[in-house]
Amino acid sequence: MSYIEFEPKYRTYTIMDREHEQLISIINRFFDEWVGNKGVNSLPYLLELAEYGQNHFDSEERFMENNHSNNIEEHKAIHKKLMERLVEMIQRIQNGEEITMETFQFLQHWLMNHIAGTDKASYGVLGNKAH
Ligand SMILES: [Fe+2]
Ligand SMILES: [Fe+2]
């Protein structure tokens, strides 16, 4: 069973869903590996998440601009903050902070609250059209 399920409430019914699915899949792979082997080297997963996350934010900002979505500037500022928080977390882990369930709770909130809140609010109208 996956740590994060891509439930309907998280879907935006736009092409962005595929990228969200990729991000969820990185966290789920990381979780599975951690459950199976607590001594997992977490860094590759976190770096993959940071890299794919940044690519997704860039791609989503272009997508919103092309579609005249709501609150783009505010949304961009939130993306910037999210990346900062992720980088801070990665640095703490690099400095020896242990991976625990709280790590995964953080990642889940980090990604899913943003999708369910800000993403859907910005381009939810588009999503409804495409639905
Ligand atoms: Fe997104
Ligand atoms: Fe976003």
Image: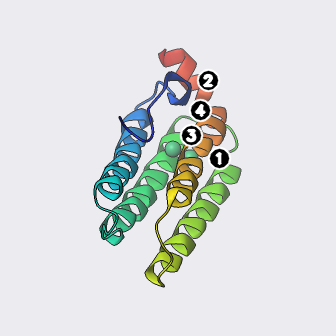
Q: Name the kind of residue labelled 3 in the image.
A: Ile
User: Residue 6 location, x and y as percent?
Assistant: 44, 31
Residue type marked 1: Ile
Counting from the top left corner in percent of width and height, residue 60 is at 48, 46
Looking at the picture, how far across and down is residue 53, in whole percent?
44, 56
Give neighbour class at mark 3: few <14, some 14-19, many 20+ (Cα, 10 Å): many
Q: Nearer the viewer, mark 3 or mark 4?
A: 3
Give neighbour class at mark 1: few <14, some 14-19, many 20+ (Cα, 10 Å): some
**Whole-number angstrom distance, CA of label 3 to CA of label 4:** 10 Å
Residue 49 falls in image quadrant: bottom left
Residue of label 2? 125
> Which numbered disc, 1 or 2, marks the residue that appears first in the sequence?
1
The earlier-in-sequence mark between 3 and 1 is: 1
Distance from mark 3 CB to nearest ligand 1 atom below 8 Å: yes
Quadrant of the rendering where the N terminus is positioned: top left
Asked whether residue 111 appears in the rendered view, the answer is yes
Q: Residue placed at 45% from the left, 39% from the top?
A: 4
Report how far apart the C-alphas of labels 4 and 1 lie in the structure.
10 Å
Which of disc 1 and disc 4 is earlier in sequence? 1
Residue occupying the point 45% across, 60% down: 54
Q: Is residue 64 above or below residue 88?
A: above
Q: Secondary structure at mark 2?
A: helix
Q: Which residue is mark 1?
A: 72
What kind of element bears circle 4?
A: helix
Between 16 and 63, which is closer to the camera in this rendering?
16
Q: Where is residue 62? Give x, y as percent.
A: 48, 48
Q: Residues within 10 Å of mark 4 (few under 14, many from 20)?
A: many
Whether residue 35 is situated above or below residue 3 in the rendered picture: below
Residue drawn at (59%, 32%), measured in percent from left and top? 123
Q: Are marks 3 and 2 in contact (CB under 8 Å)?
A: no
Instruction: Quickly name the residue at label 4.
Output: 123
Residue marked by disc 3? 115
